[in-house]
Image (cartoon, rainbow, N blue to C red):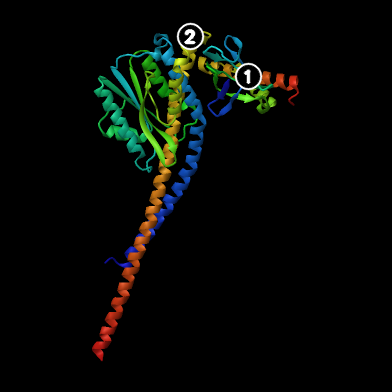
Amino acid sequence: MPSTLAIRRQIRSVRNTKKITKAMELVSGAKMRKAVASALATRSYAHCAWDLLQHLATRVDRALHPLLAVRPVRRSAVIIISSNRGLCGSFNAQLAMKGIGAIRRAQEAGAQQVDIITFGRRARDTVARHGYTIHADFPKADITTSIMDIAGIIHVITQGFSDGSLDRVDIVSSSFVSSIKQNIEAWQLLPLVTEGFVRTGITESATKETAKKDSDFSQFVFEPSEQQVLGHIIPRLLETQIFQAVLETEASEHSARMMAMHNATEAASEMVGDLELTYNRVRQSAITQEIAELSAGRAALE
Amino acid sequence: MHLSIVTPERVVFSDEIEYVTLPTEEGEITVLEDHVPLVGILKPGELVISRAAEMIPLAVSGGVVQVRQQMVTILADTAERVEEIIEERAEEARRRAEQILAEKSFDAVEYAVLSAKMEKELARLRVARKWRKGTGIR
């Protein structure tokens, strides 16, 4: 039996931990609201942009723009977006595992080289620990506010894809569904796929709608010219997709952390309850013992 | 015909309309019912929506327009209704950009950013002035 003093000490320590996790829950709640608001605000823009990109990719000559090219995959890139901080449950581990899955799949599909690009510290460390070489790591701010924050990634992949050194780009990110549900997924950014490609969350409805309307018309009129329009919009629409993925991952991160902290707080409460019960039992048994000893002593005297 | 105008910040407009006039790189175009499918680049300027005998002017600062059957989607960098533009502030922003442009020397990227900003502010001002005086909105 542990002493009452030891149990009391343990209760105090658990209570302190509970205070901390409670505070962290509140903080991530506030951060989550902010991140979710910005992810949702740009969602319809990203959704329309993705829709437009897919439309264009089916209808124009792919030779018109380097980013529309489809080549046999020799070298591919996987971008893994994650968070900088832990304490958010299995969120980062899941991202890293999905990332490793995507890397393996690329290797099995025949890519001779797979470049791993990480954005966010956590997945970078996990992936590196699994023995993969990170090709490029971009430092991520805790809250991404401007598209300029991801300019580096955009540059690396558009440059690589345009000059033919990259043939395929996948992104591993999390899309925010609700504060208790996040979809962690790997999806293909380049080359632009069109047929039967459904990305959960953001684009599901749009893709269905597109498929329905496909037969309605065949060719777009471009203004000023096909080449100029494509040159102007494709890079920007791609940027928007990556940016949206980052925002959604951040929203997911904060909600995952809020849930993790909520669970931790609840577990702490439960633990305090258990410990209090043990404490009372130990105290009571000590009292009972003393009384028994007292009455035994008295009985011996009589 | 359905028109939706989306910017990275929000959905500015989404409703049934009769026609819309937009500023493209090639000049102003008006999209009516049954327009051929079109993809075009928008430049900063004035966009006018006509809905049920009502004219809604907006200032846009560039973007992309896509016309599909009975559906116009505008992905704009920014789009503001005339009521939302504060003329003094737009004027001040323009002047500030002009000043910076005149004072310092830049690399190509900075220069492009600034002159795009100038153009955008000018478009806002133009739209605000025109519609406020012309139609007596205010």
**From where the camera sits, is residue A83 visible?**
no
- From the viewer's side, name the closer residue of A121 and B71: B71
Residue at image position (56%, 14%) is B34
Q: Position of residue A228 (x, y in %)?
A: 49, 10
Residue at image position (47%, 44%) is A29
Which residue sits furthest bottom?
A302
The tally of labels here is 2
Q: Mark 1: which amino acid?
A: Glu
Q: Residues within 10 Å of mark 1 (few under 14, many from 20)?
A: some
Residue at image position (26%, 33%) is A130
* Secondary-structure class at tag 2: helix
> As drawn, is A273 to the left or to the right of B125?
left
Residue at image position (67%, 19%) is B127
Q: Position of residue A101 (x, y in %)?
A: 28, 30
* Secondary-structure class at tag 1: loop
Q: Mark 2: which amino acid?
A: Glu
- Disc 1 designates what residue? B18
